[in-house]
Image: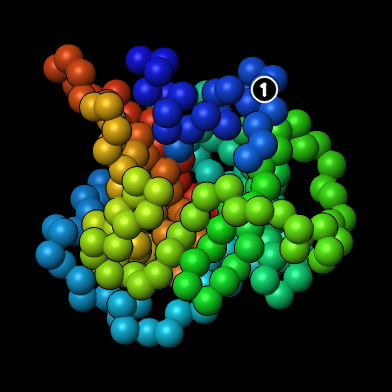
Amino acid sequence: MKKYLLIFIPTLFLIACGAEEQNVNETTTTTTPSSPTENTSTLAEENVNLSNFFMPNNSIARFKGEGNEFATYTLTTKHLYDDYVATYEDNGGTVVERIYSIQPDKISLIAQNGEAYEIKNHTLTELESMDEIEVYLQSPFVVGTDFNGWKITSTSTKLDTTLQSFQDVIVLEKIDQGSISRKYFAKNFGEIKREFIVEEGEEPFIVTSTIEEVS
């Protein structure tokens, strides 16, 4: 089982144990991603500003976790410059800093550091010198778009949380070595849920993190 956990959320387990990398929650309703042929969201037709897929500047979002002690976390968001955003994810074991570059058609992860207990002041020159580690989110937001092993399986999912009911949620899915990983994105919020499922035995093993509060 541990190998699946390391595949899906390495920062929750590897970094929580003290490793530094360079680079999930409670819902009121169980939701199922739409079928691969469904694509009724207006996001598929809009010229979407990808900066809208992050929390507001200086916001602190709280995520309720189920299935693992490190699935509960808080996420602090800092808008550094027009095209750069940093997040600080505190799961009680460590704080992970992630820095993203926003481009017209994608959001790239350009830095990921564990043990980031202080918020850093990055210069624009420093950020521009960072190379892409991986694509975090990519348009067009239509079913079938894929990158880094992830595929958009829905752009019109409804997700009910303790914070609010979200419409037109984008669902990304990755299938790897018998496990299913999903990420849920909502406009004006960004990532609002993570889900990891392993089908084994009579009941599946599930780890989730779902947004429950933003301040």
Residue plotted at (83% across, 64% down): 125
Q: What amino acid is labelled 1 in the image?
A: Ala
Q: Position of residue 61 (x, y in %)?
A: 61, 52
Q: In the rendered view, would you say 82 is above or below 13?
A: below
Q: Is residue 29 in view?
A: no
Tell me if residue 120 comes above or below residue 9 in the rendering. below
Using a 10 Å C-alpha cutoff, classify the residue at mark 1 as few (fewer than 14 neighbours), some (14 to 19) or many (20 or more). Answer: some
**Front-most of residues 159 and 88:** 88
Horizontally, is 132 left or right of 2 in the view? Answer: right
Residue 147, how many percent across, how many down? 37, 54
Q: Secondary structure at mark 1?
A: loop
Q: Is residue 4 left or right of residue 83?
A: left
Residue at screen point 27% across, 27% down: 177
Q: Which residue is mark 1?
A: 19
Answer with the quarter of the image where residue 86 lies: bottom right
Estimate the x, y position of residue 51 in percent, counting from the top left. 58, 72
Horizontally, is 56 left or right of 168 in the view? right
- The number of callouts visible is 1
The quadrant in which residue 139 appears is bottom left
